[in-house]
Amino acid sequence: MVLKGIALRKERNPEHQIEDFKSSAQKVGKLYPVLEDSYGNVIDGQHRLEADEDWPRIRLESVKTEKDKIIVRLIGNACRRTVPAQEKTDMLDKLASILLKEGLKPGEIAEKIAEDTGMSYRWVVKYLPEKYKDPAQSRRRSHESLDAHHATGLLAEVLEPPKRRDGLKINKYANTDFVLLMLDKSFYSEFEKDCLELEMPPEYCVMKTLEEHHKKVRRAITLKQRTLIRP
């Protein structure tokens, strides 16, 4: 969750965080309460308490186990601030180890964490330690990264403007099934010469060039959609 107009920054050291809490409390009030489990133990907000021991608290009566606390801490931190990748992995490691002891298999843990936390499956797999994944999940992650890389490169190629930006004009008419392509004469002369050198009609060369570029455009669209749609 990102609040509009507020830029999340990189995590600061504890001393600076405490000073930040003191400063923000004076300016805008104490926005985020300290979270406690059903027994009064602090789940999230230790730095806020160090900034002010009277910082508002909320006791979550439904949070009783260590697993409950990790889930709340994971959701509360990941959705509220910029969490370093290693910290995300550490929290997922603790949660996954509990689920493993409860009898879940490595291939089932990522889906269970996504279900319990509301985080996307893709996010969980990204930061979950490898030992809690099955080979298929690792391959899927590898394919996702490869698709993203291909989509980025192919999109950059497809979207790169032509060197001769004013070298082509297109006119469409309502009374015919064709459109009129008008090429810069000097460019077409060079193009025609190369086509005839290969004993190919220029019309074929133009059509094949358009077909090949259209294939790249369609491929880029497919990769882009596949990358965006995955959970």
Image (cartoon, rainbow, N blue to C red):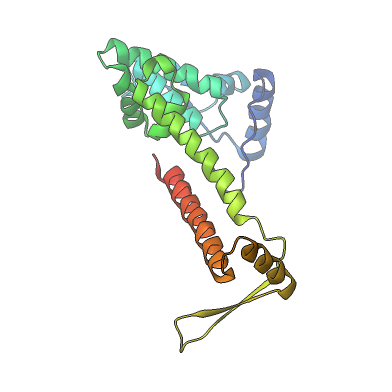
Q: Residue furthest top?
A: 101
Q: Residue furthest bottom?
A: 175
Q: Is residue 49 visible?
A: yes
For image coordinates 40% across by 14% down, the residue present is 131
Q: Is residue 11 above or below residue 181?
A: above
Q: Give the quadrant of residue 11.
A: top right
For image coordinates 46% across by 28% down, the residue present is 126
Q: Is residue 159 above or below residue 133?
A: below
x and y, in percent, of residue 110 in the image: 35, 25
Q: Residue furthest right?
A: 186
For image coordinates 56% across by 44% down, the residue present is 152
Q: Give the quadrant of residue 46.
A: top right
For image coordinates 56% across by 69% down, the residue present is 201
Between residue 78 and residue 174, name the one nearer to us. Answer: 174
x and y, in percent, of residue 156 in the image: 61, 49
Q: Is residue 206 shown left or right of residue 117?
A: right
Between residue 182 and residue 144, name the one nearer to us. Answer: 182
Between residue 46 and residue 158, name the one nearer to us. Answer: 158
Q: How many labels were placed on the picture?
A: 0
Q: Residue furthest left?
A: 103
Q: Is residue 67 shown left or right of residue 196?
A: left
Q: Is residue 91 shown left or right of residue 155?
A: left
x and y, in percent, of residue 98 in the image: 34, 13
Q: Quadrant of the C terminus?
A: top left
Q: Is residue 224 above or below residue 119?
A: below
Q: Is residue 37 visible?
A: no
x and y, in percent, of residue 100 in the image: 31, 13
Q: Is residue 159 above or below residue 100?
A: below
